[in-house]
Amino acid sequence: MGRIKSAIVLTLITLIIAVLCVVCFVPFPWGSDGIHYFNPIINWADRTSDFGGYQYGEEAGYLGGSYSVVFYPEGVVSAKEYRDNSETESEKEYVAYSNGAIYLDKEEVCGGGTEPTEEFKTAFAAQLDCLKERFSRLHAEGVSLEVRDGYTVRATLPSSMDASVAAFLYFSYMGDVTVLYGTSSDAASASQVIPETGKDAKPASEYIKGASMRSNMGTAFVEIDFTDAGLDLLSSATSGAADSTGYLFLQVGGETVVNLSVSEQIHDNLYISGSYTNDSAKIVAYTIDTALSSEAELPALSMGELHHVDGNFEGLTLGSFTLNALNIFYIAFGILFVAMAVFFLIRYGRLGFANILSYLLFLPLMVLIYWAVPITVGAGSIAAFAISSVLLCVSNAVAYEAARKEYAVGKTITSSVKTGYKKTFWHIFDLHIVLVIVALLVYLIAITELSLFGLALTFGVALSGICSLLVNRFLWFVTMGLSKNPGKFCHYKREEVEDDD
């Protein structure tokens, strides 16, 4: 095969492998709202508890553990709440909606009819946009929003995220941003400072530019950025703070999101730290910032019951990293893969890329098999995967060494490859067949984890044989076409023969 054809074929093969690896291993956001993540195939494969897995069900969320709630607009209740409160709220009339999944307040939502009013639909759309903006800013894998039954929103956050429960609560707050100040720790007795009250009252965005999360030397804090007019009002309100401690409350829709004591007059932007983590500081900042940018005066959303799906991720926690069985496997696999790649590249030169590519094809195909069969990812299936991986690399090395010997005695590289594979084909083939038969017997005879090991090994060995005898040989043929000196390309050398004089 010519160099141009080899380059084209090799590029196509590399692209196919890259796509398979992305689909199998890489989560990434999709859609324009930034709250939907593609869940890679490896996350959909069943796992044992040691490897952080759980069975997916109708209400399951992000693999690795998640929290979820359903948000209800004002005047919308679940079927359960309707049944529980039907006697105590008999004066209200509700209309069943979405086959009875939710109930709508006939007057408040439907305007006396049986269908939601356009005003309600517009308000719900604005609430949904606000939720999307807040959740999308988290930029976390496992975050999702889903409109259900027409007028409710199911939100999901990963358990690994700090303050997941607080995020649901704060993100349900909607409405105007207000700043209160008083001499009591009770917000009810405080006076409103921002925005100014009166006939010519301006919105809070005229006094507060925005809110953001900052981090410095491991400390997270929320920054509230005021306009000059806002700072003037704050400075005036807190003028007596040096003599008597005051309390400042920042609210969204009448709900307090920031509460702090003030012991001196405020002249500059607020930098609020304390017990915030990066995640909790983001939640507070995004709640305030999105409320400021919202043009509509939206009613708050009510929260349904909190649901928790346990991902069973147990292990040593190092900061945000959990050292459990699954992560230990990832670390070990990464080290061994690098060691394998280095060995083949040093021993066989650029021919080592043929082995690397055949293994990188083997890897996602095994993940697809584990997902499709399905095979639970546990100690047994991981052991079978490791054995199959070693078998593939050893089989490739045996074929490479056989060709090396043929080339050393004077044959051309093409003849060496053909003869090398001819001499080793049946040895490699027989080994794989024997191992497949043994693995099948183990699967049929054994029980529980050992049976799982046998099933995983059966597929692993079969795929190893295909990749070694067919895929790897084809990749060798393709990659070798890129070099003018195939012997040097493979790090092969001729044997030196001394002349007898």
Image (cartoon, grey):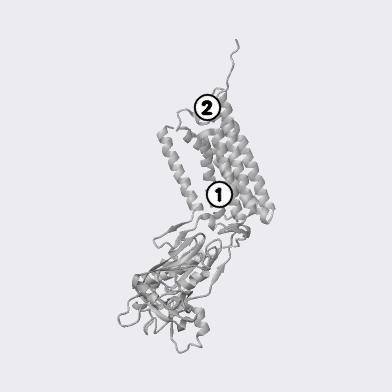
Say whether disc 1 or disc 2 marks the residue closer to the N-terminus.
1
Task: Classify 295 as above or below 417.
Answer: below
Residue 460 in the figure: left or right of residue 3:
right
Q: Quadrant of residue 123?
A: bottom left
Q: Quadrant of residue 57?
A: bottom right
Which residue is label 2 attached to?
415
CA separation, marks 1 and 2?
33 Å
Could you say where residue 68 lies in the image, as x and y percent from the top left? 51, 69
Number of the label disc, if any, that sits on residue 206 = none
- Specify whether residue 125 is in view: no
Residue type indicated by callout 2: Ser
Pointers 1 and 2 in contact (C-beta within 8 Å): no
Could you say where residue 144 lies in the image, as x and y percent from the top left? 47, 65
- Specify whether residue 165 is in view: yes
Task: Classify 99 as above or below 407.
Answer: below
Could you say where residue 485 lies in the image, as x and y percent from the top left? 47, 27
Residue at 64% across / 49% down in the picture? 383
In front of the other: 76 or 491: 491
Residue at 52% across / 60% down in the picture? 218
Quadrant in which the C terminus is drawn? top right
In front of the other: 300 or 351: 300
Callout 2 secondary element: helix
Q: Residues within 10 Å of mark 2 (few under 14, many from 20)?
A: some
Which residue is label 1 attached to?
366
Could you say where residue 150 lies in the image, as x and y percent from the top left? 42, 73
Residue type indicated by callout 1: Met
Quadrant in which the N terminus is drawn? top left
Task: Classify 234 as above or below 383.
Answer: below
In front of the other: 340 or 360: 340
Q: Quadrant of residue 8?
A: top left
